[in-house]
Image (cartoon, coloured by chain):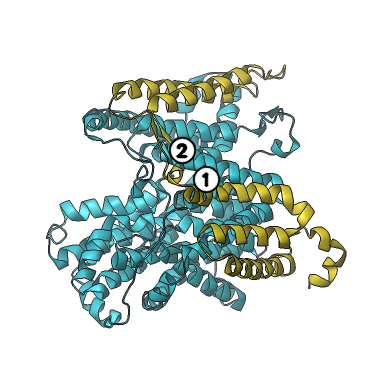
């Protein structure tokens, strides 16, 4: 998803302006000369300035570089799936783990990601389940990370050593 | 003074030794798989080491990162595919030797030079750090401010060809650092009413997202196929033993360059390797030659440099509490979580801990030789593991890494967000290292800047009042002027020459995290 430097610069410029504007709303306590907004204001101005420079530099090779380069993953549905399954699985984990528990969520994520990588669904499921069980044992029992158990909460005491 | 017996006593702990061995095998595996970096190896260790005692936790990162940097040489030499970006500089030389049937020479040179470079930097670290720490005890907010600014400046200048893009990344990191409560007045900033943001962004989730997830996303559609014949190699020890003496100057030079570059915040092992390689190619009598001896000299110089940079990075980390690279940034966060405050007082309060950490460097680099040989022999097996199985498991450990440090699902969400951001930044040639250093050093810079400004009531001359602070300040400004001069000179020449990058090839190997 490569875009032209002019666009990159404009995005950074806009971000810098937002940061600087927000910083001005932070009022200094009465006894201090410089308040909580002072440093972010400087950083925001810096961000806006370099955004402007990147855009201006981009103008120099306006015709040399394309405005938008199609990303590698956009070439096929399979490639897009392999790419987007990564951030997608993390978001799925965030929203599903409390309800489903770690064991089921991890198995689903691992199976889906392995299957998207071209592994047969059954093999992916077996591998995913084994990894999920091993990870659950290691993290919950050995490292004592409070992983959610979901529907297994009532019997989780038996499963943690 | 610390008694050597006390250090030996700490090192004799079987648990510590077990952790070192396990981390060594883990680091060798991660480094030998193309696409997985030493930084990723360190970040993925976090969920495990967070529950360990401080020494085994730090030993684990030191060992795993040193091993991963060496192991990156193996696929580089055998498949012409560097396992970590730190090995990219000499991949062509090493692979050319392999094609001539001299795999043992290529990999043996890398292995012994890596261990020698690592040991060299460990010696410098042990000798230099205590004296620097004594000087650092007299530092005030001005000195720390300038050290932070110097670190960020170096990180930005070496990050890539475009200075504005390096700066954009730096300012982005500094902006992210301002999220949460203001260190001076305690007023919340950029939190938008969310209690999750009150304490600021956690370093580990951001780091895992920016470096590990974005790397997985970039490699999502690349399968690493290859066949490496590791059975017909000759003996490594005897072949290389005789070659070490003629190349000792190259190894020492590499070790020195690596230690110095590593000590500069932001400049990691890949940059150390490239600089050392370039100097060996142009400035050394043996390295200039196009024969096997020249290739071995270049491999040894660069390989010594990338491992030495790991030790170098611990100099600012232990002495000032300022990380030299992203790996030491993880070490510093782990130290804070474990109640060890890196900085000059560490040398006064916990000298045995710090010297044991230095001793672990020696152990890790000595261990590298036998385990490295084992890894070279077993590389054929590592290649048989398809990435389709490995990547999802790494993804799961990324999620668990963020969760186990912060104990919130919000942190897991941050991993996804910063994964996408890291991918977008690298594809658009915005380097990641300045952003992460901005996030790490931001609070230190803001706090020291605000303290100094409030103390002087706005008089900027205070930043140049003290002898050491003023000198570092003047030096930082000189570095800025030199860098802007060099960049604008070379930038004008590059604009016409650089072809537009494609999505997949947009990130040159030497600018990725090591």
Task: Please tell me in which quadrant of the rendered image residue B369 appears.
Answer: bottom left
Q: Give the x, y percent position of residue B368.
A: 41, 72
Q: Give the x, y percent position of residue B373.
A: 37, 77
Residue found at x 55% / y 39%: B439
Secondary-structure class at tag 2:
helix
What subunit carries mark 1? Answer: B
Mark 2 or 1 closer to N-term?
1
Q: Is residue A103 left or right of residue B480?
A: right
**Up-down: is B321 above or below A124?**
above
Q: Quadrant of the N terminus of chain B?
A: bottom right
What subunit carries mark 2? Answer: B
**Up-down: is B178 above or below B400?**
above
- The dot on residue B456 is none
| Residue at mark 1 | B210
Do callouts 2 and 1 point to residues on the same chain? yes
Residue B335 makes an appearance in the image? no
Between marks 2 and 1, how big is the CA–CA gap?
9 Å
Q: Is residue B345 left or right of residue B216?
A: right
| Residue at mark 2 | B425
Residue B427 makes an appearance in the image? yes
Q: Residue furthest right?
A: A154
């Amino acid at each position: 998803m490569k875009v032209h430097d002019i666009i990159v610069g404009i995005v950074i410029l806009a971000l810098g302006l937002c940061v600087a504007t927000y910083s001005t709303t932070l009022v200094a306590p009465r006894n201090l000369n410089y308040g909580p907004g002072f440093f972010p204001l400087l950083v925001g101005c810096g961000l806006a300035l370099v955004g402007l420079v990147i855009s201006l530099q981009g103008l120099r090779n306006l015709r040399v570089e394309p405005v938008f380069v199609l990303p590698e993953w956009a070439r096929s549905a399979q490639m897009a799936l392999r790419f987007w399954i990564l951030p997608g699985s993390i978001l799925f984990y965030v929203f599903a783990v409390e309800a489903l528990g770690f064991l089921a969520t991890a198995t689903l994520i691992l199976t889906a990601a392995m299957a998207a990588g071209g592994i047969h669904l059954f093999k992916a499921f077996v591998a995913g389940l084994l990894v999920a069980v091993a990870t659950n044992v290691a993290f919950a029992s050995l490292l004592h990370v409070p992983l959610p158990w979901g529907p297994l909460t009532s019997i989780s005491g038996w499963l943690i050593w | 003074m610390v008694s050597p017996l006390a250090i030996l006593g700490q090192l004799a702990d079987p648990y510590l030794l077990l952790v070192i061995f396990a981390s060594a095998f883990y680091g060798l595996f991660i480094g030998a798989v193309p696409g997985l970096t030493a930084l990723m190896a360190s970040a993925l260790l976090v969920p495990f080491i967070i529950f360990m005692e401080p020494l085994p936790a730090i030993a684990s990162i030191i060992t795993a990162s040193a091993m991963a940097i060496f192991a990156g040489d193996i696929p580089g030499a055998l498949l012409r595919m560097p396992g970590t970006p730190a090995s990219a500089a000499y991949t062509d030389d090493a692979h050319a030797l392999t094609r001539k049937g001299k795999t043992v020479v290529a990999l043996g040179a890398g292995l012994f030079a890596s261990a020698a470079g690592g040991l060299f930097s460990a010696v410098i670290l042990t000798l230099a750090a205590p004296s620097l720490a004594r000087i650092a005890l007299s530092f005030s907010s001005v000195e720390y401010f300038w050290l932070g600014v110097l670190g960020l400046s170096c990180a930005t200048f070496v990050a890539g060809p475009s200075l504005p893009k390096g700066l954009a990344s730096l300012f982005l990191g500094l902006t992210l650092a301002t999220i949460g409560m203001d260190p001076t007045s305690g007023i919340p900033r950029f939190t938008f009413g969310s209690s999750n943001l009150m304490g600021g962004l956690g370093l580990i989730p951001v780091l895992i997202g920016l470096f590990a997830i974005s790397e997985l996303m970039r490699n999502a559609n690349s399968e690493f196929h290859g066949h490496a014949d590791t059975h017909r190699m000759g003996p490594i020890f005897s072949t290389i033993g005789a070659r070490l003496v003629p190349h000792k100057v190259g190894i020492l030079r590499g070790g020195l360059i690596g230690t110095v570059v590593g000590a500069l915040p932001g400049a990691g092992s890949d940059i150390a390797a490239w600089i050392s390689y370039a100097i060996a190619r142009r400035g050394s009598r043996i390295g200039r030659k196009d024969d096997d001896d020249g290739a071995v000299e270049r491999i040894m110089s660069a390989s010594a440099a990338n491992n030495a940079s790991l030790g170098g990075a611990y100099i600012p980390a232990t002495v000032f509490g300022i990380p030299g690279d992203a790996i030491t940034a993880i070490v510093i966060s782990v130290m804070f979580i474990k109640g060890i405050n890196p900085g000059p007082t560490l040398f006064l309060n916990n000298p045995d801990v710090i010297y044991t950490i230095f001793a672990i460097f020696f152990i890790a680099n000595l261990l590298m030789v036998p385990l490295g040989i084992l890894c070279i022999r077993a590389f054929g097996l590592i290649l048989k593991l398809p990435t389709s199985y490995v990547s999802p498991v790494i993804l799961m450990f990324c999620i668990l890494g963020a969760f186990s440090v912060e104990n919130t699902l919000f942190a897991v969400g941050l991993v996804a967000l910063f994964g996408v951001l890291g991918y977008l930044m690298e594809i658009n040639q915005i380097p990641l290292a300045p952003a992460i250093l901005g996030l790490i050093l931001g609070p230190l810079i803001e706090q020291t800047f605000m303290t100094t400004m409030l103390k002087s009531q706005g008089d900027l001359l205070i930043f140049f009042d003290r002898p050491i602070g003023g000198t570092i300040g003047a030096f930082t400004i000189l570095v800025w002027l030199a860098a802007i001069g060099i960049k604008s000179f070379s930038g004008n020449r590059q604009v016409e020459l650089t072809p537009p990058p494609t999505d997949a090839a947009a990130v040159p190997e030497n600018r990725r995290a090591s």
